[in-house]
């Protein structure tokens, strides 16, 4: 399995505190069946403002440290990029790490509402060649109230990553039900740990896959942690038909002009 979203990089956010904690997380991940992790520190959420160069430096140190320990684990760098002003310009100037330096990026939304400009931002990202993978939509208040909102975002080119612990109920029933609804609607492309520590939020993926299997079947559940993250790591194009169901013509008319261009 590949974990596309993990706060493994030490000392840069509320994830691993130091190299020892990163090592403990990496060991847990390997024991759980994870063979590759994308280290995705928070960036630009008003708290964490490390430059890309700083993150890359720390990433190299982490990689070397884990290599010495001999863990069968491949590491990649990405970032958990918060929706913030200037996002597209920062990406274009290569100031923020995309996933494995390719076209996909993790995009974290605010916890409660969906900003009114979101659809346009998603559209612009896709138009510029970036593919946003929206992290844990099941934890967003507006999507919990109405999962159809995620359908709208997918029409504007968003992919979705659900968190394994959401599906196994550790964030409560509301979050679990929303995660399950999104999976059953075929809106979810990736399951990841969003792990922050070896104790409270460990990098466990296998239990989440088992929960997903019950909802969408074994093959589809496995794709969320194998084929799909592989494609994202490689920066391969996303076949639109896999995640964008054609809206009924009446709804299509309601979409702004720029969104219809996307289809
Ligand atoms: Fe995260």
Image (cartoon, rainbow, N blue to C red):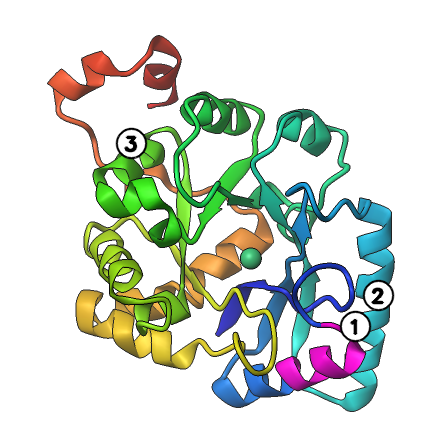
Q: What stretch is highlighted in magenta?
A: 17-26
Q: How dense is the environment of label 1, judged by Cα within 10 Å: few (below 14), some, or many (20 and up)?
A: some
Q: Which of 23 and 238 is in front in this view?
A: 23
Image position of 24 (left or right of 247): right
The residue beneath circle 2 is 60
Are the residues at dot 3 and dot 1 in contact (C-beta closer than 8 Å)?
no
User: Secondary structure under badge 2?
Assistant: helix
Are the residues at dot 1 and dot 2 in contact (C-beta closer than 8 Å)?
yes
Residue 96 pos. (x, y %)? 72, 41
Q: Nearer the viewer, residue 231 or 221?
A: 221
Q: Which residue is drawn at 22% across and 41% down?
A: 146
Q: Quick check: is the Cβ at mark 3 less than 8 Å away from ligand 1? A: no
User: Secondary structure under badge 3?
Assistant: helix
Residue 156 pos. (x, y %)? 37, 28
The residue beneath circle 1 is 63
In the image, is residue 224 above or below residue 205? Answer: above
As for residue 21 lying within the magenta part, the answer is yes
In the image, is residue 59 above or below residue 150? Answer: below
Is label 3 or label 1 in front?
3
Residue 125 is drawn in which quadrant? top right
Image position of 43 (left or right of 55): left
The residue beneath circle 3 is 152
Identify the mark nearer the N-term, 3 or 1.
Answer: 1
Q: Main secondary structure of the magenta part?
A: helix
């Amino acid at each position: 399995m590949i974990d596309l979203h993990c706060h493994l990089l030490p000392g840069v956010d509320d994830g691993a505190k130091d190299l020892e904690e990163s090592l403990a997380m990496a060991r847990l991940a390997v024991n759980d069946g994870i063979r590759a992790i994308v280290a995705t520190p928070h960036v630009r959420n008003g708290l964490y403002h490390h430059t890309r160069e700083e993150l890359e430096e720390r990433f190299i140190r982490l990689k070397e440290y884990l290599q010495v320990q001999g863990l069968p684990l491949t590491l990649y760098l990405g970032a958990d990029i918060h929706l913030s002003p200037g996002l597209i310009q920062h990406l274009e100037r290569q100031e923020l790490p995309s996933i494995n330096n390719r076209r996909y990026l993790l995009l974290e939304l605010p916890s409660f509402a969906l900003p009114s400009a979101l659809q346009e931002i998603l559209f612009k990202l896709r138009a510029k060649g970036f593919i946003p993978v929206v992290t844990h939509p099941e934890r967003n208040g507006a999507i919990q109230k109405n999962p159809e909102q995620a359908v709208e975002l997918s029409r504007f080119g968003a992919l979705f990553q659900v968190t394994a612990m959401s599906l196994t109920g550790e964030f409560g029933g509301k979050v679990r039900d929303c995660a399950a609804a999104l999976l059953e609607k075929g809106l979810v492309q990736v399951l990841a740990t969003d792990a922050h520590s070896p104790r409270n939020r460990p990098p466990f993926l296998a239990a989440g896959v088992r929960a997903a299997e019950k909802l969408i079947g074994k093959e589809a559940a496995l794709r969320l942690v194998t084929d799909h993250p592989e494609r994202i790591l490689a920066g391969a194009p996303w076949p639109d038909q896999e995640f964008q169901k054609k809206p009924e013509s009446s709804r299509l008319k309601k979409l702004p002009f720029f969104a219809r261009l996307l289809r």
